[in-house]
Image (spheres, rainbow, N blue to C red):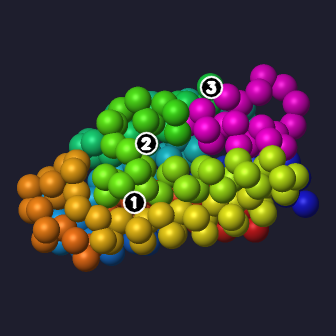
Amino acid sequence: MSETVNYDSVVTMLTTVANKLKDNRDHLSQLDSATGDGDHGTAIAKVADAIVATIEKDESKELKKLLKDIGWAAMSTDAGSTSPLYGSLFMGMSEAVPEEGAIDCAAFATIMESGIAKLRKNTKAEVGCKTMIDTIVPAMAAIRASADGGKNILEALTDGAEAADKGAESTKDMLATFGRAKNIGERARGHIDPGATSMAILFTGLKEGLE
Ligand SMILES: [Mg+2]
């Protein structure tokens, strides 16, 4: 169980992610209201809708094409900086899907790493900048360590989701150096970053969708 994933299991995982993101729409906008313009829930819901719409119209049943199409759809949303970040994440994931053969935990980790590498070309943020990077870096490190340690995909995603939550929580005490939040200085402290939170929801959704 959970030794490999295929088109159908990834569709379930991504549908779960999209539903969780939409369920958290108001919460994410409230978080963004504290430090930004209060639109993150709206932005992330547009990406979630793009994921679902792309899944529904996909006839190829090929994971590589599906992820690429989701990337383009997310990129094409009117969701501010969220569009290129999530768009490049899915496009990068697509690039690492093997042409043939099963996707085991090592291959899954490589797919995630490819997506994150492409996402990071769209931001100069590093760990400590109070952004989604504070979620992504520890989550990916946990997934890679679990894969290298011989765990299966569900175990790796469980470790990844836990690290993602901690990473998002870590943004609470940070000062912002990116986005609108950087303009409010010390007032950003005490608030968890909305982009870090939505990214943690993504990792949890992947895990719950596979369960
Ligand atoms: Mg905003």
Contact (Cβ within 8 Å) of mark 2 with mark 1: no
Quarter location, residue 122: top left
| Neighbour tally class for label 2: few under 14, some 14-19, many 20 plus, Cα within 10 Å | many
| Neighbour tally class for label 3: few under 14, some 14-19, many 20 plus, Cα within 10 Å | some
Q: Nearer the viewer, mark 2 or mark 1?
A: 1
Residue, x 22% and y 57% (percent of image)?
A: 176
Residue bearing the label numbered 3? 95
The numbered mark, 2 or 1, whose residue comes first in the sequence reads: 2
Alpha carbon distance from label 2 to label 3: 14 Å
Q: Position of residue 47 (x, y in %)?
A: 40, 49
The amino acid on which the numbered mark 1 sits, given as a three-letter code, is Ala
Does the Cβ of the disc 3 residue fall within 8 Å of ligand 1? no
Residue, x 39% and y 40% (percent of image)?
A: 85
The numbered mark, 3 or 1, whose residue comes first in the sequence reads: 3
Question: For the C terminus, which image quadrant?
Answer: bottom right
Residue bearing the label numbered 1? 196
Local SS, label 3: helix
The circle drawn on residue 86 is 2
Quick check: 163 left or right of 108?
Answer: left
Determine if residue 35 is in view.
yes
Q: In this picture, which residue range is highlighted in magenta?
A: 96-115
